């Protein structure tokens, strides 16, 4: 990711005045490397076993028992968050954010009080209002989505996402980040994305500067079924192309420029792939250029619908014998979402991709603002201009990212310290983006320039 500016100069074959001499660092941040190493496979395994021990975590299940049902499971996650909070000197703020859902004629048959279990690590820079969210869903189900009493272990769906969030909270709350990170186990996914919808609407209503949301759902099993495919080296990241909240004016520009492959969520997905390359060696993020699996949605969807940048992490190959299934033996096959079908080293690496992404983003300065590509004259050059972010740390410089229009990923980047660039590459043939970076090389998400005169 951090290719040096001099290499890029060579690849261009000539120099232009935009290239500054003081190159940013190109090495991984040892702090992030250390945090990724601190993710404990044993903790992930123990936490899954504990979640499964609540019998069912169905959204309509018991909330009074201390041992069984969604209420007991929520209380336990909250108590774990409180342990991490103590270890963080009380900086990690823990709450159950409760809300009531009325009968919906579908999967909610009576008024239900739900709760998202949240741990918030406030940013250390009071001027930096950026927020990042990472989620998994705590609820589970069996074949009949209304069955709230049968055992529904939900080890992988979505114990995997829930324990990843818990382990991220444990490791990251010992460190300091200028921006705020929210670790959340949302409820009600299986009944209709209720917890994530509540949180996305709250973020919108309260005007959070929510920069990115990472949804982890079904990411701890590495063996697919029918066909049998074992793949413990790759993780899928789903991202929307056309933003759900696109206006008519934005649609006109998008059609003119064919920028349907450059939504903020798509560029967040590209960012996760680079974070994985840098901090989880041997592992790979596979970019899925669609919002979710075929005709399906997840907890990132309500965030997209509220206009936020959000993606979904899921394992490479699912095994549907161990998802949404009554526990049973049938023709010699065992059905049910048990921990024994999971791959914990794989889950640990996938948790590492989340950590590398979140830490890189939360340590980076905010993205540049008002990024524009000048269109006053017809030329074969590309002139870009932007403004430094108004809040938080001042960037040490910027990268201008570039790729051919048919390329799926960024191909080149140019380091500049100014807030403008004049590139000898035609905007007719390339797509550009601009990112902020600090002296250590932490990069913001890229901003795609808008045409300006
Ligand atoms: Zn799920």
Image (cartoon, rainbow, N blue to C red):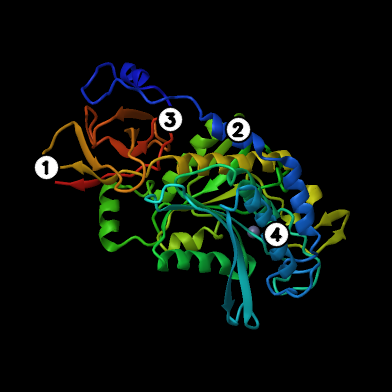
Mark 3 sits on what residue? 440
Q: Given contact means CB atoms under 8 Å apart, are the residues at marks 1 and 2 in contact?
A: no
Q: Given contact means CB atoms under 8 Å apart, are the residues at marks 2 and 3 in contact?
A: no
Left or right: where does residue 44 sit relative to residue 28? Answer: right
Beta carbon at label 1 within 8 Å of ligand 1 = no
Which quadrant of the figure has residue 251?
Answer: bottom left
Q: Give the quarter the ligand 1 occupies.
A: bottom right
Residue depth check, mark 3 versus mark 4: number of the one nearer the observer? 4
Residue depth check, mark 1 versus mark 2: number of the one nearer the observer? 2
- Regarding mark 4 in the picture, which secondary structure is present there? helix
* CA distance for labels 1 and 2: 48 Å
**70 vs 130: above or below:** below
- The image's mark for residue 376 is 1
Residue depth check, mark 1 versus mark 3: number of the one nearer the observer? 3
- Regarding mark 3 in the picture, which secondary structure is present there? loop
* CA distance for labels 2 and 3: 16 Å
The crowd level at tag 4 (other Cα within 10 Å; few <14, some 14-19, many 20+) is few
Is 138 in front, or is 252?
138
Q: Given contact means CB atoms under 8 Å apart, are the residues at marks 4 and 2 in contact?
A: no
Mark 4 sits on what residue? 79
Can you see residue 71? Answer: yes
* CA distance for labels 1 and 3: 36 Å
Left or right: where does residue 372 sit relative to residue 331? Answer: left
Question: Could you tell me which residue is drawn at 35 percent across and 23 percent down?
Answer: 23
Looking at the rendered structure, the number of numbered marks drawn on it comes to 4
* Residue 358 horizontal/vertical position (percent): 51, 44
Residue depth check, mark 1 versus mark 4: number of the one nearer the observer? 4
Mark 2 sits on what residue? 34
């Amino acid at each position: 990711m951090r290719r040096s500016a001099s290499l890029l100069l060579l690849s261009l074959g000539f120099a232009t005045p935009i290239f500054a001499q003081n190159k940013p660092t190109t090495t991984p941040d040892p702090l992030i490397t250390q945090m990724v190493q601190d993710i404990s496979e044993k903790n992930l395994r123990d936490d899954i076993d504990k979640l499964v021990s609540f019998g069912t975590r169905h959204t309509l299940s018991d909330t009074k028992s201390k041992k069984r049902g969604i209420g007991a499971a929520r209380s336990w996650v909250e108590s774990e968050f409180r342990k991490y909070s103590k270890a963080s000197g009380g900086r990690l703020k823990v709450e159950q954010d409760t809300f009531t859902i009325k009968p919906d004629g579908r999967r909610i048959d009576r008024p239900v009080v739900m709760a998202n279990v949240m741990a918030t690590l406030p940013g250390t820079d009071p001027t930096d209002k950026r927020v990042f969210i990472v989620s998994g869903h705590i609820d589970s189900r069996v074949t009949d989505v209304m069955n709230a009493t049968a055992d529904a272990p939900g080890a992988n769906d979505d114990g995997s996402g829930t324990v990843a969030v818990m382990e991220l909270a444990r490791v990251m709350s010992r460190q300091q980040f200028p921006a705020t990170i929210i670790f959340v186990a949302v409820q009600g996914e299986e009944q209709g994305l209720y917890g994530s919808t509540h949180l996305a609407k709250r973020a919108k209503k309260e005007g959070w500067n929510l920069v990115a949301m990472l949804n982890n759902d079904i990411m701890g099993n590495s063996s697919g079924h029918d066909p049998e495919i074992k793949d413990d080296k790759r993780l899928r990241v789903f991202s929307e192309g056309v933003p759900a909240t696109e206006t008519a004016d934005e649609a006109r520009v998008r059609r003119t420029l064919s920028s349907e492959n450059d939504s903020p969520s798509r560029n967040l997905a590209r960012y996760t792939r680079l974070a994985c390359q840098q901090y989880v060696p041997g592992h790979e993020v596979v970019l899925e250029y669609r919002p979710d699996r075929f005709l399906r949605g997840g907890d990132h969807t309500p965030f997209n619908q509220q206009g936020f940048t959000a993606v979904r992490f899921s394992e490479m190959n699912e095994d549907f014998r161990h998802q949404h299934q009554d526990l049973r033996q049938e023709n010699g096959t065992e059905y049910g979402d048990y921990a024994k079908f999971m791959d914990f080293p794989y889950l640990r690496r996938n948790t590492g991709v989340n950590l590398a992404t979140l830490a890189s983003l939360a340590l980076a300065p905010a993205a540049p603002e008002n990024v524009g590509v000048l269109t006053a004259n017809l030329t074969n050059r590309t002139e870009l201009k932007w403004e430094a972010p108004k809040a938080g740390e001042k960037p040490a410089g910027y990268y201008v990212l570039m790729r051919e229009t048919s390329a799926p990923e960024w191909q080149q980047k140019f380091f500049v310290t100014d807030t403008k660039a004049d590139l000898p590459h035609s905007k007719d043939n390339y797509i550009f983006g601009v990112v902020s970076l600090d002296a250590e090389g932490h990069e913001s998400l890229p901003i795609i320039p808008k045409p300006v005169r």
